[in-house]
Amino acid sequence: MKISIFGTGYVGLVTGACLADVGHHVLCMDVDQEKVDKLRDGIVPIYEPGLETIIQHTTEAGRLTFSTDTEEAVNHGEIQFIAVGTPPDEDGSADLQYVVSVARTIGRHMSDYKVVIDKSTVPVGTGDKVKAAVQSELDHRGVELPFDVVSNPEFLKEGAAVADFMKPDRIIIGTDSERPRALLREVYYPFNRSHDRTIFMDIRSAELTKYAANAMLATKISFMNEVSNLAERLGADVEDVRRGIGSDPRIGYHFIYPGCGYGGSCFPKDVKALARTARDCDYPAHLLNAVEQVNEAQKHVLFDKVSHYFRGELSGRTIALWGLSFKPNTDDMREAPSRTLMEQLWQAGARVQAFDPEAMEETQRLYGDEAGLQLCGTKEQALKGADALVVCTEWKEFRSPDFAQVAAALASPVVFDGRNIYAPEMVTRHGLTYYAIGRGCNQ
Ligand code: NAD
């Protein structure tokens, strides 16, 4: 099938590559000339395991192409995916300008039937706005052409995006007509061979499903962080509590890990956007607002611990920081807890020596001018001459360090573990003081 995708970010690029991998002919369009030039040269601008190989062989096979030409993109596919960003507006609502702009582009250039599929995460009711935007361009041109609007939210996780797309837990398709339903079945047929994972529903329910899923996951994290803060004050160990509650199948072990807060491009903005939607329909979303408040506070917990340890005297200190991306296996720094920590440390007069396996380039782009930041080539280099070590992201390579070496390298032998990746005795037997999240019995 011939498919066009607008937006070559994490979602658009992975969608395009995976659809091309199973045999579809995909054109990925982006307004970012530099990104498209890189992709045409075989350079993948984001880090996502497995993506580069797929892009390489599908472009070589001629099934995946890249363009900045909107007209070419609209003409290419009967299927038109919108996968552009929906960043938060100042009031927390999702900014739909990019989505609507693509919808207009489609209306402006289409010459035959199109299925316009919203893959971006968009508030309930956006389907109507997309429809109106396409229609207004058609009216402006004075032509009558058939089209359908579909909501097909994406559930891939950064860091495992290719695997998630190839083996989805579910494919949500919101539509009220038969024609796009049949076409979408065909698009996704290769991903449904073993059993059909497609769930059809109306457009508004599909739009809400995406927000409900992310809000539920964010709620689990904030809930566990709240329990961890209680555990700390009560002399309990949240890690035992986690195992204790996770063993109940009604609760389960997934997504109940305490830490230094959630980040990324999705949870923070989607929780805010859903809370905003609630306000707009006069519903007081107490829980959603609390989820966000708990998370904001949690992003400050590591700084508070470090500051408390050094009795508020951070000026002139050097802090080694392991992990910058908002989670492992990605270079994404959007709303990463490491950023809150670094900014607080700089404000207090401390320096940061940081290492991350993938997010160094992005950190350099964001904070290259910051005098208090030194990006180091290895995690060991980050330790040299530092007063303390803070772990912000649970990358695999941080899980079993040589603690004797860590202790020898640090001026004050202390480790702050923002992700509870170590067993306390693993660290303390090397003479290091260990602070984690919610492990009151050890602190
Ligand atoms: P992104 O910021 O990585 O990429 C968006 C891309 O769209 C950029 O390359 C930008 O240049 C391009 N763009 C903007 N306007 C355009 C236009 N008019 N025409 C063509 N391209 C245009 O965003 P992302 O992380 O891929 O997210 C896209 C959407 O998917 C968002 O709504 C997001 O909430 C949702 N989503 C993201 C994830 C994730 O893990 N990142 C997961 C599920 C859903």
Image (cartoon, helix red, strand yellow):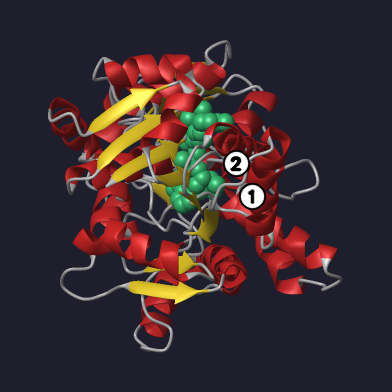
Q: Which mark is residue 196?
A: none
In the figure, 222 relative to 19: above or below?
A: below
Q: Which residue is mark 1?
A: 130
Query: Can residue 408 be seen from the camera position used here?
Result: yes
Q: Residue at x 56, y 53 (%)?
A: 121
Q: Is mark 2 within 8 Å of ligand 1?
A: no
Q: Position of residue 422 (x, y in %)?
A: 32, 55
Q: Position of residue 247 (x, y in %)?
A: 34, 85
Q: Label 2 neighbourhood size at 10 Å, few (<14), some (14-19), many (20+)? A: many
* Residue 31 vs residue 176, the one in the foreground: 176
* Residue 334 vs residue 60, the one in the foreground: 60
Query: Can residue 222 be seen from the camera position used here?
Result: no
Badges 1 and 2: C-beta atoms under 8 Å apart?
yes
Q: Position of residue 295 (x, y in %)?
A: 63, 56
Q: Residue at x 54, y 31 (%)?
A: 109
Indicate which disc, 1 or 2, sits on the residue closer to the N terminus: 2
In the figure, 286 relative to 136: above or below?
A: below
* Residue 293 vs residue 144, the one in the foreground: 144
Q: Position of residue 374 (x, y in %)?
A: 45, 16
Q: Which residue is mark 2?
A: 103
Kindly indicate the quadrant of the structure image that contains residue 284. Answer: bottom right
Label 1 – label 2 distance at C-alpha: 6 Å
Identify residue type, mark 2: Ala
In the rendered structure, the answer to whether residue 95 lies left or right of residue 239 reads right
Identify residue type, mark 1: Val
